[in-house]
């Protein structure tokens, strides 16, 4: 596969600032997640700056422990147009190590009360050593669409 990212797009009938505010709240990410892997946010502070780290409790049946934790580092923060983070883990010594995959939401206002949201999962920076034991993407493209529909429900109901 030459393509090293997958994305999905959905238009929601709310302003971009509202969509961005929901995406910048890590406590809502489990409700947005289309895979069912995100359980709950460990760090509850809103995402406000590039370099900020927020941790999430996760579950995956194929993970050696089932339950695990990831550390996400904000890479893109351009309110209300884009937000994205790298996913990795914290080692026992406290060192953060990122695998090279990025989750990114791009928001394009289509007027005062409508926003086109594109969710992209990009694994182009994943080193070969990780590709030897993890398959990319680790989910089907329908999970991105599911996430966008969950996001649409959340931003429309509030």
Image (tube, rainbow, N blue to C red):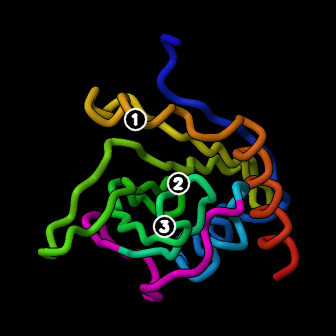
Task: Indicate the position of residue 142 as horizontal and vertical percent values.
Answer: 78, 40
- Local crowd at mark 2 within 10 Å, few (<14), some, or many (≥20)? some
Query: Which of the two discs, 1 and 2, sits closer to the camera?
Result: 1
What label does residue 65 carry, if any?
3
Q: Secondary structure at mark 3?
A: loop
Q: Which residue is mark 2?
A: 81
Please give left or right for residue 84 compared with residue 92 in the image. Answer: right
Prevailing secondary structure of the magenta residues: loop
Task: Indicate the position of residue 122 as horizontal and vertical percent values.
Answer: 47, 36
Closer to the chain start, of discs 2 and 3, is 3
- Which residue reaches farthest top? 2
As drawn, 24 above or below 117 = below
What label does residue 48 carry, if any?
none
Please give left or right for residue 98 compared with residue 124 in the image. Answer: left
Task: Indicate the position of residue 58 as horizontal and vertical percent values.
Answer: 54, 69
The CA distance from mark 2 to mark 3 is 36 Å
Q: Which residue is mark 1?
A: 133
Residue at 53% across, 62% down: 80
Residue at 41% across, 67% down: 70
- CB under 8 Å between callouts 2 and 3? no
Residue at 70% across, 45% down: 144
Please give left or right for residue 35 compared with residue 87 in the image. Answer: right
Please give left or right for residue 88 compared with residue 25 in the image. Answer: left
The CA distance from mark 1 to mark 2 is 34 Å
Q: Secondary structure at mark 1?
A: loop
Task: Indicate the position of residue 72 as horizontal and vertical percent values.
Answer: 38, 64
* Foreground of the two, 79 or 112: 79
- CB under 8 Å between callouts 3 and 1? no
Q: Quadrant of residue 124?
A: top left
Span highlighted in magenta in the image? 36-53
């Amino acid at each position: 596969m030459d393509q090293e990212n997958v994305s999905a797009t959905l238009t929601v009938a709310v302003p971009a600032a509202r969509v961005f505010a929901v995406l910048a709240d890590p406590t809502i990410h489990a409700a947005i997640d289309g895979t069912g892997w995100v359980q709950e946010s460990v760090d509850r502070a809103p995402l406000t700056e590039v370099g900020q780290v927020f941790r999430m409790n996760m579950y995956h049946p194929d993970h050696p422990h089932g339950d695990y934790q990831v550390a996400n580092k904000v890479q893109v923060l351009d309110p209300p147009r884009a937000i994205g983070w790298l996913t990795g883990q914290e080692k026992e010594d406290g060192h953060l190590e990122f695998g090279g995959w990025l989750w990114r939401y791009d928001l394009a206002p289509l007027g005062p009360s409508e926003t086109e949201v594109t969710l992209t999962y990009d694994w182009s920076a994943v080193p070969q050593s990780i590709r030897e034991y993890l398959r990319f993407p680790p989910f089907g493209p329908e999970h991105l669409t599911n996430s966008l529909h969950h996001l649409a429900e959340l931003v429309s109901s509030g």
